[in-house]
Image (spheres, helix red, strand yellow):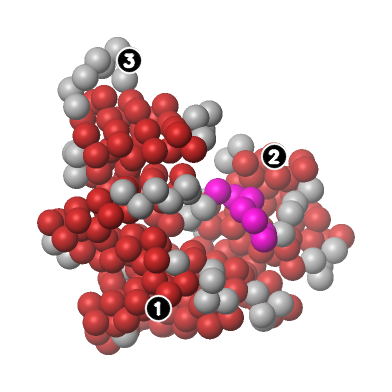
Amino acid sequence: MLAAASLHLSTAFSKGEAPLAPDIERLYDAGQYRQAAEALRAALEQNPQNTSLDYWLGRSFFEIRDFSKAISSFERAVKIVPSSSEYHDWLGRACGRKAEENIHSNMPDALPFARRARHEFELAVKLDATNIKAQRDLIAFIANAPGSLGGGEEHALQQIRALSVVDATEGTLALADLYAEQKKFDQADAEYQKVLESGVGRIDIYFQVADYCRDRSDAERMERAVEAVAEIASSNRRLSYYRGVALVLAKGDLAVA
């Protein structure tokens, strides 16, 4: 149900997130999430009221797909700091993934987690309407959820309009994602083209366009998105990957790819 939301995860240490001790940060950034979780649990024994440790422990459990433990960690964090939009958003993500985990094998257990996910996303947006990740997560949930869980196109469009007031480009991207999810690819293409022509100086925006073009095997437009990133951040390490994919799609020089 929340697979689309995973597209919008940011890098680990974005602006506004609680910092970690350098040794734990290195483990997390290196993808050594189990070791990071062990270090975080040890740190929590020394400082159990440090909510940032619970938050990052939840992030580590999320990465290793132990969603039950992630939920427990995020719940401890929001209990101490109930006003954190970021904490509620991540609790929603963990609940959503737990619902996905149960949806085929145990539907009755999946539904409470799905309802909790929507509640947490809505609360995260209510606490901070400028939390773009929470806005996009809520929209992705509504777009993919059945009507019994408050899903549906009209509800999704309503939330997209609310997002557009905060960030017009993100609203356009969310609308493009909705059309792509509905397989209305002509409309999706038009919205992604608007983003590509917007001149917005944010690499994450162009990478989202590149991901769509990759999935649609649109090599020409993918190359344009990648070059837009290169003009902003020519040393970004993801550029090599995207350039390689674009070459494969364009049937270009495979050795270079």
Identify the secondary structure beneath mark 2. helix
Residue type at mark 3 is Val
Q: Which mark is residue 26?
A: 2
Q: Which mark is residue 162?
A: 1
**Residue on which disc 3 sits:** 256
Q: Which mark is residue 38?
A: none
Residue 173, x across and y down, in percent: 33, 60
Residue type at mark 2 is Arg
Q: CA distance from mark 3 to mark 1?
A: 44 Å
Q: Earlier in the sequence, mark 2 or mark 3?
A: 2
Q: Earlier in the sequence, mark 1 or mark 2?
A: 2
Which residue is pictured at 35% across the width and 52% down the height?
198
Q: CA distance from mark 1 to mark 2?
A: 37 Å
- The image quarter containing residue 177 is bottom left
Residue type at mark 1 is Ala
Res. 68 in view: no
Q: Is residue 13 magenta?
A: yes
Q: Earlier in the sequence, mark 3 or mark 1?
A: 1
Q: In this image, 149 relative to 11: left or right?
A: left
The extreme top residue here reads 255
Res. 17 in view: yes
Q: Is residue 60 magenta?
A: no
Q: Quadrant of the N terminus?
A: bottom left
Q: Nearer the viewer, residue 212 or 163?
A: 163
Residue 158, x across and y down, in percent: 32, 81
Residues drawn in magenta: 11-17
Residue 181, x across and y down, in percent: 22, 62
Which residue is pictured at 39% across the width and 48% down the height?
199
Identify the secondary structure beneath mark 1. helix
Image position of 246 with respect to 119: above or below? above
Helix, strand or loop for the magenta stretch, by majority: loop
Q: In this image, 73 relative to 152: left or right?
A: right
